Image: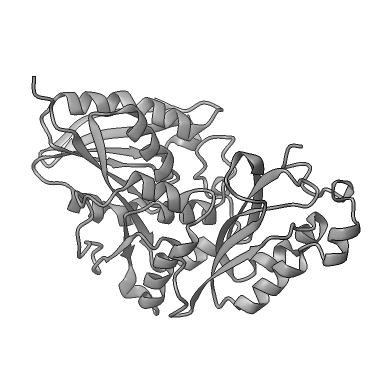
Amino acid sequence: MTAHPKTPLSLLVGLSTTLRQPVLDAMLDATTVAVVVDQDDLAARGVLTWRVLDTAGPIDAGEFTVGDDCGACQLIESLMPLLETLVARQHWDHVVLSAPPAMEARPLASTLVALLPEITVDTVTCVVDAVLLVEQLSGDELLDERGLALGLPDRRNVAELTARQIEYADVCVLANAHRSKAPDRLHNLLLHLNPRTTVVMADATGVPDGPVARTGLFNFAAAESWAGDLAASDQVQPSGEGVTTVLWRSTRPLHPARLNEALEDIVDNVVRSRGVVWLANRPTQRVRWESAGYSASLGTLGEWSDTEHLAECTVVATGMGLDPARLQSILDACLLTESELASLDWKELEDPFAGVLPQ
């Protein structure tokens, strides 16, 4: 018995559903079915609404209930049977999934790869607004403050979501570029945030001028590698058009109190940074470093002994108008000095991150 070929799926993400509509239209053809998930009713009624359509018009509609738990998790769980049913009908040979504005592509794609063998993720496309991109990447406004949070536990900020959507995309559509004073700078910024992406410009009506679906560009291993805990340092982009990416490394640990005091200076003019750091008072722990806009966060990644790496610090930071020497100097000043390395009892150091990092 001949196995039925896998159905390619294109995933569409981005904060603006208005700017996404012309891109969605460009993805549709006579052999494509689209699942469009909307979160307009989430805050008022606790539901995500969905509709299924193709070029002939609407096919089906419904809603997913979102409780007090992880809205993204519940969405993924509810979507899988719907996608499975559409593919089983064998009426279309391409599926488009248009995610709600606050949804990241990574957990959706990871679940599709793991749980739906009849589907192959083909393209992840992210639509960004050239007028608002720098503002969205630079602030500290929470999604909840914009009415965009996916449930009560969702404490992400707009900058974090925007960066993560871009970092996982095979294609970034730069919409509203005709209204931007520096489209080349924004193009370069997108490549610094995700060197593996293809930037497609949209015309004044929002229609993309290049392929946005069925590109075959999605590579799960490559996407996970770049969007993982540590961006691949060998893909750091050279400075240009006012955009700079800095790679900072050290084989010495960070003094936790000095790092905490320097957080605001570290993220100044940095739109995005990621890395793995070594805190002196937690000598065995790998600690994730992440910042987006004015917000920085730390998390645990396990033990250094569980990896092939010696304990070290590695941070990749991208900014507009960023002074690499200044940033490196600030980070260097947070390290233990030679005398501290020799004389301090590291574990007795003050722990300003005790509330966010488990012992």
Instruction: Tell me residue 212's x, y (percent).
Output: 23, 55
Vertical placement of residue 137 versus 217, above or below: below
Identified at 22% across, 23% down, the residue is 85
Horizontal placement of 353 versus 126: left or right? right
Instruction: Tell me residue 254's x, y (percent).
Output: 75, 58
Q: Nearer the viewer, residue 118 or 190?
A: 118
Q: Nearer the viewer, residue 237 or 290?
A: 237
Horizontal placement of 304 versus 177: left or right? right
Note whether residue 303 is visible.
Answer: no
Horizontal placement of 247 versus 23: left or right? right
Identified at 77% across, 57% down, the residue is 260
Q: Quadrant of the C terminus?
A: top right
Q: Quadrant of residue 265?
A: bottom right
Question: What's the image's color scheme?
Answer: one colour
Instruction: Tell me residue 205's x, y (percent).
Output: 23, 65
Outermost residue on the top side: it is 1
Vertical placement of residue 301 versus 52, above or below: below
Number of marks present in the image shown:
0
Instruction: Tell me residue 44's x, y (percent).
Output: 49, 34
Q: Quadrant of residue 54?
A: top left
Horizontal placement of 221 versus 281: left or right? left
Identified at 65% across, 55% down, the residue is 296
Q: Quadrant of residue 40?
A: top left
Note whether residue 222 is visible.
Answer: yes
Vertical placement of residue 50 versus 18, above or below: above
Q: Nearer the viewer, residue 213 or 176?
A: 213
Q: Quadrant of the N terminus?
A: top left
Q: Nearer the viewer, residue 143 or 240?
A: 240
Identified at 60% across, 61% down, the residue is 315
